[in-house]
Image (spheres, helix red, strand yellow):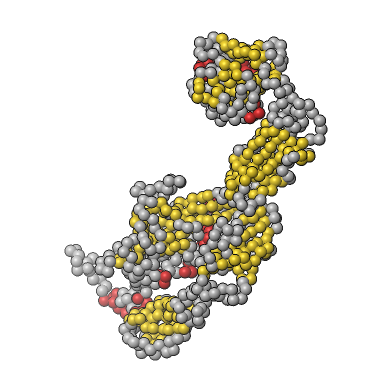
Amino acid sequence: MKSKLAVITIAGLVLLAQSGSAGVTDPNIIKEVIRLNSTKPEPVLVNGGLMQGAQIFSDRTNFFYGNVGRFAGLDYIQTTMDDKTIANVQYKIGVKKAGTLYLIIDNRVGDGNASDPPSIGSGVMDWVPAMGFTATSYPIGFSEGSTVYQLAFTGDPNVITLYEQNDGSSRAMYAIFAAPAGWNFPPAILNVPTSSQVEPGDNLVINATIDDDDGPLPSTVLWSVQSKPGGSTVVFTPDNTSTDVTISFSHLGDYILKIAAFDGERTTEQTVQVSVRLPTFTLQGDSHLDICNDSNTGPSGRHIAVRSEVRNYSDGATTQRRRIAYYSYDISEFKQPGKAFANTYLGMNAYRKRNQPIHVYGIREEHDNYNLSTGSWNTAPGVQNTPVPPLNSEITIETLDTADLSPRLHSVYIPEQGVWEYSPASAALDEFLNADTNGKVILMFIDYAPESSSSFEIHSRTSSASYAEPETGLKGILIKGNYMTQTWASKPNPAIHTSQSTNISQLSWTNPPTAGSITCDVFLGTAEPNMTDPTYGLDTLATGVSGNSVAIPSGLLEVNNVYYWVVEVHDSVAGTTRGFVWSFDTNNTMPVVTIEKPIQYLWLGNAGDPSYARAVINATVTDDNFPEPYTLLWEQISGPASVLIDPNNVEDIVLDLAATGTYIFKLSADDGGLVGSATTQIYVGATPCDAAKAKPTYVQMPADFNNDCYVDLSDLSEFASAWLQCNVSMDAPCN
């Protein structure tokens, strides 16, 4: 009978408040076994000897029972393994009272598949169903996989004849045991896994079945926790006396649960090992590109090979290599509602090692449809390309076009050649991936170290020389991490790795989707975080926050510190989710200088006076005014004549340029700690046509024969003067 009853708890076990009689306790039922039509070693009767570790076959000393569960202590027969191929073998089982006979049949019989019950019939052990044996779901430790069949019998007749298996190969011979009628089996616990893995925030649902003979009392159950991570909680719903339970876990880690079934006399226990883990993912780049500003390919070329390179190299003579790498990734399969990236990091395998860090940025989504297979510096997002920096110029932070980029996501050091190494996790990379909406991202890798003596070279996914990652078999620069139902706080403000003023007034974040009501604890400090510490090794800023922000007390933040902060989420249903470490610093940030027109093409007389060209230059400077308000300085870097700049300490200036040629001016913003700058290039021609011809986009009109930017009578006169003339190189007369 299958029971799902529970009422009163007594001495730690759940019992029914009703009387019952004890079952049969003497297991002895088989009196003999006679085998016919085989000359193999004789089978052996073992009264009351079925147990874990018992020998299964009479002719094999290296086959033993595993867990026999509810059948422990019964009479069993050591059958003969070599009888499995005998076509007419018979086993005559003599019994002395009523009971149940059991056969254990190798699942591979009939079809060779150990995962499913044996294929009986059509000449393969078809006597089993013909005699009335029925399959059960009782587990037992026998062979690679097996099924227990049962047949109830009376005491008259007292001989039961079993027949051939006749399916040898790698199968095991069937095994035999028996139980007397009225035997009190311990309850059988079914449909309970021995192990399970659960994502944080998800529940483990178990619908157990207790199979019992109802003796002496109907069976009852009790769930308990045997071990768990420190500080964690486990909740059984509706309670821990139910066979059907929903189990929630508050923390990551390993848990051991136990279910006990009690029938008033005998108890069966089973443990469940539960691992609460973040599921993992690995992304391989689907395309890559190296853009170049060097003597090899120049800004209009690209370097797409089996190795991608990041360089900022010059030998001081002939070799100039300035290269930035891009990798694109398809993350569309992971963009599912309620799921999010966490603990993301980079894995790579180097062709050459570098001792300087390579910096990683993300391309903003509005530019991530850029075609890496056809790109070059002239068109690539994230770098200055209007104008392109001078050929072979050093790569610096000013080389970037920050309007196209995310904040810096990571700085990584390159591993030894042939060795797979992995960066630390980056919360900024988490945020970048989670903010994506179109399923595609591009990462940019850049080296600022000046005049590098070597290059960063990474084997791409197409390189036959590269070493595949042992775990996944993938190549190139991999994005790895966890991917799961979001139960943690995200989108920190201040953003990760940013520099802030000491007078910021609050920390804020986005709470996860809620299963119940949410409160948060917030921790802040300058010490290196300790993830094993309940407070992360930081100071407790606030507890029980019901919203998504907390005030920073005035005067708490000090200059030139790195501050770490963590938001721990408590969900009344899903439990507690430990937070991820975010950081910001109170170091100085470089002023950002933006010039409205970084390049202009002018001509003498553009403002009415033919003796000069007038240039109007508008600039914008943004800064945190830390450690002090910035000061400005305009300077002339080059040009055909010296130019007076007055005033030279304002954003917007007007210059009169008296000589033709190319001028370069620079605006610097100095905040007392760092200097940010930008340049503008101004070409002055003698005429508007000269200015037009200096533009890279200039194309001469077909009818403008004298190339003076006008189609007029001068062009017609030139055309008429050459009417009917022949090219002197022709050997034929004019026609």
* Horizontal and vertical percent position of residue 429: 51, 60
Please give the name of the residue rendered at 73% of the width and 22% of the height, measured from the top-left corner: 24
Name the residue at the top extreme: 37
* Horizontal and vertical percent position of residue 108: 54, 25
- In the figure, 142 relative to 198: above or below? above
- In the figure, 563 relative to 288: above or below? below
- In the figure, 80 relative to 214: above or below? above
Pick whichever, 166 or 30, lies toward us. 30
Asked if one can make out residue 573 in the rendered structure from this viewpoint, the answer is yes
Pick whichever, 435 or 202, lies toward us. 202
* Horizontal and vertical percent position of residue 81: 52, 19
Pick whichever, 731 or 143, lies toward us. 143
Name the quadrant of the N terminus: top right
Please give the name of the residue rendered at 73% of the width and 40% of the height, measured from the top-left corner: 12
Count of numbered circles in the view: 0
Please give the name of the residue rendered at 35% of the width and 76% of the height, measured from the top-left corner: 694
Q: Which image quadrant for residue 422?
A: bottom left
Q: Which image quadrant for residue 693?
A: bottom left
Name the quadrant of the C terminus: bottom left
Pick whichever, 275 or 29, lies toward us. 29
Name the residue at the left extreme: 731
* Horizontal and vertical percent position of residue 719: 29, 74
Q: Which image quadrant for residue 156?
A: top right
Question: Left of 472 or right of it: where is 434?
Answer: right
Please give the name of the residue rendered at 79% of the width and 35% of the height, measured from the top-left corner: 16
Asked if one can make out residue 376 in the rendered structure from this viewpoint, the answer is no
Question: Left of 46 or right of it: where is 181?
Answer: right
Name the residue at the front extreme: 11
